[in-house]
Image: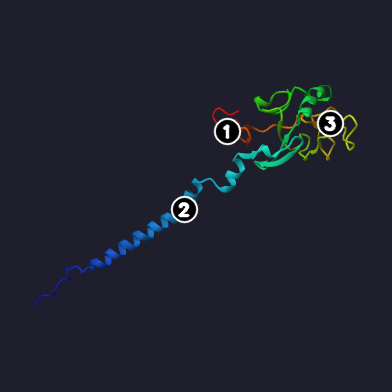
Amino acid sequence: MSEAGPSTEQPGVDQSRRKFLTVATSATAAVGAVFAATPFIASWKPSERARAMGAPVEFDVSKLEPGQMVTLVWRKQPIYVVRRSEAAVQRLAANDSRLKDPKSADSEQPEYAHNEMRSRRADLLVVVATCTHLGCLPKQHFEPGDAEISADWPGGFFCPCHGSKFDLAGRVMSGSPASTNLRIPPYSFRDQNTLVIGLDSAAKGVA
C-alpha cells in the first residue's frame, strides 16, 4: 500500500475576509496620506499674519480736521497721516534755508511725492513715523513758535530721543542728528476721502 504524497490541495481562501482586509488597508493608507499632506495643503494658504504684514491699510481722511493727525500701522510700521492747514502749506517754502535736504534729493519717497510738499495732495502728509536717525518716534509740534522747541519754530515734528527736527513735509532741519528726511510710504486714494497705504494705485483712474 503506497503512502500518500504531500497534499497539493490549496487551503480554502476566505474571499470576503481578503476583500475586507484590502479595503481596510487601502482606507488606512488614504487617511495617512491625507494627514501627511495636510501641512503641505495648509502651507498653500497665506496665513493671517502674512496677510496682516503686507495688506494695505485704508483710512477715511474726512475724519481729520486741519491741524489734526492720526497714527496708523502698516507692515508693523507706525504711519502718521496729517491734515495740513492752508497756512501750514504756505509756510513750507520758507523753510528751505533751514533744511539739510530741502529738495529731498537724498531722501526716500515715491516719485509722486518728490516735491516741496512731499505728498500727492497739499493738505495731506503721509509719512513713516520713525526718526531717520535711530528709529525713535517723533512727536507732533505743529504750532509755529512752540515754546517747547523755539520761538522761530515753523511747526513740524520733534524727536525726543536725540533732538532731530522735521518740518510739516517731514524734511529734516539743519543741526539735527538725523541726516535724511522722514520716509514716505507708497499710498494712493481710492476716492476723494479714502486713503490707501501700501498701494501706489488703489483704483484705475484714481491718483
- CA separation in Å, label 1 and label 3: 35 Å
Residue located 73% across and 34% down the image: 83
Looking at the image, residue 181 sits to the left or right of residue 145; the answer is: left
Give the quadrant of residue 155: top right
Say if 112 sits above or below 2 in the image.
Answer: above
Q: Nearer the viewer, residue 105 or 55?
A: 55
Q: Is residue 96 above or below residue 202?
A: above
Pick whichever of labels 2 and 3 is earlier in the sequence.
Answer: 2
Residue 194 picture location, percent across and down: 62, 36
Which numbered tag is attached to residue 44? none
Please tell me whether residue 185 is drawn above or below residue 25 in the rendered image.
above
The location of residue 73, given as percent across then percent down, is 67, 42
Disc 2 secondary structure class: helix
Q: Quadrant of residue 200?
A: top right
- The residue carrying pointer 1 sits among few (fewer than 14), some (14 to 19) or many (20 or more) residues within 10 Å by Cα, namely some
Task: Give the side of residue 143 with respect to residue 110, left or right.
Answer: right
The residue under label 1 is: 202
**Screen quadrant of the C terminus:** top right
In the picture of the structure, the residue carrying the numbered disc 2 is 38
